Image (cartoon, rainbow, N blue to C red):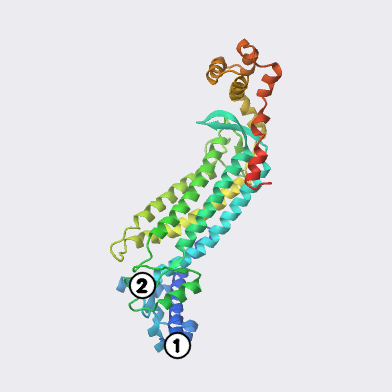
Amino acid sequence: MIERYTRPEMGAIWTEENKFKAWLEVEILACEAWAEIGEIPKEDVAKLRANASFDIDRIYEIEQETRHDVVAFTRAVSETPALGEEKKWVHYGLTSTDVVDTALSYLIKQANEILRKDLHQFIAILTEKAKEHKFTVMMGRTHGVHAEPTTFGLKLALWLEEMRRNLVRFEEAAKVIETGKMSGAVGTYANINPRVESYVCEHLGLAAAPISTQTLQRDRHAQYFSTLALIATSIEKFATEIRGLQKSETREVEEGFAKGQKGSSAMPHKRNPIGSENMTGMARLMRGYMLTAYENVALWHERDISHSSAERVIIPDATITLNYMLNRFGNILKNLTVFPDNMKRNMERTFGLIYSQRILLALIDKGLSREEAYDTVQPLTARAWDEQTQFRPLVEASEEITTHLSPEEIADCFDYNYHIQNVDLIFERLGLN
């Protein structure tokens, strides 16, 4: 991922140096396991643990000749000046992917620890904001058209519950992806004791795959990428709502605008929802990474390397991107400006038509059939639209309605508080007391 979208903590996981450190740790842990079994002298393993190292430039130099990065790595480690005969145990009984896949899962586990923290922080921000705006009344819209009143707090609480589900999905996907394998060239443990696999995975905090080929099966990665993409898509959904509510003709919310910030090179008045727009673009990337992960599932026989080149890009990029999205949009929510007066003002822009269902139901309660009530109310709504006039006076002047409803009953139908009477109940369901 380009530096612009890379946060330092996550970016540090995906450096070449950290990758080779993970490879070396897998190699040494495997030697320790062999020593526990009695296949390798423990004193040799102690020397490897104390002295084995690598030089990245030397790895690259050797790879120019070998055309194989793991071979280049093991040879570079074997060149460590302080190593003697014990260097022969490096990569003992292993195949390349025993190291690469296990180390990759270990690195993903590190990335997951950051993403987990990000998710909890994001959920905390939504929780605080939902409570703050619990009764901030606003217009609910369906098909982009005014429907009935709701609250901004309910909107945020809806997002909160979605992110809670995403957290559950994330934990399940993390459990699936944080898995190692050291089963040899085709998964039969022909040249490696299964106890080596168990030892290495346990010390890395990974599960050991119950069965594998030369590789971990890529359905694990597909599930993981699906989850990351879904989290990103949820953020895009929230961001799209912010964008819609920041339109000039709506202006119910606005992204924070810093002193000295500029919205346009040509128009000094512009305050654009650029952060939310950025989220939309990043979510598109995330869904692309997911598609690539799905393409990686169908490998030939016990393995091919068609997945390898793709994963070198998509795994660092996806975790870096989601880390960026969770933090940037979390800050957008934290610093969001909300305009309650504009929200109420916008509710009046449709002439009180948002209360049409209340009149409809009140007439049904008085004994009219649904069809009779609907056909009584709809012409008045059409007239209010066409003549750009208030709906309530038309209702009050309609004999078809006043025959059944008193002035007090009509007035009661035009109270927005009726529509938010169950907000407390919904918040209680979510544990937002």
Query: In the rendered view, does 191 fall on the left or right side of 122?
Result: left
Work out how far the residue at label 1 is from the one at label 2, CA to CA, in angstroms: 22 Å
Q: Position of residue 120 (x, y in %)?
A: 59, 55
Q: Position of residue 320 (x, y in %)?
A: 49, 57
Q: Is residue 241 visible?
A: yes
Q: How many marks?
A: 2
Residue at the farthest front position: 367
The correct choice, above or below, for 81 with respect to 287 in the image is below
Q: Residue tagged by mark 1?
A: 44
Badge 1: how crowded within 10 Å, few (<14), some, or many (20+)? many
Image mark for residue 121: none
Residue shown at 69%/16% (left/top)? 406
Residue at the farthest left position: 301
Q: Amino acid at mark 1?
A: Asp
Residue shown at 58%/32% (left/top)? 140
Quarter of the figure with residue 359: top right
Q: Residue tagged by mark 2?
A: 96
The correct choice, above or below, for 415 with respect to 258 in the image is above
**Dot 1 or dot 2, earlier in sequence:** 1
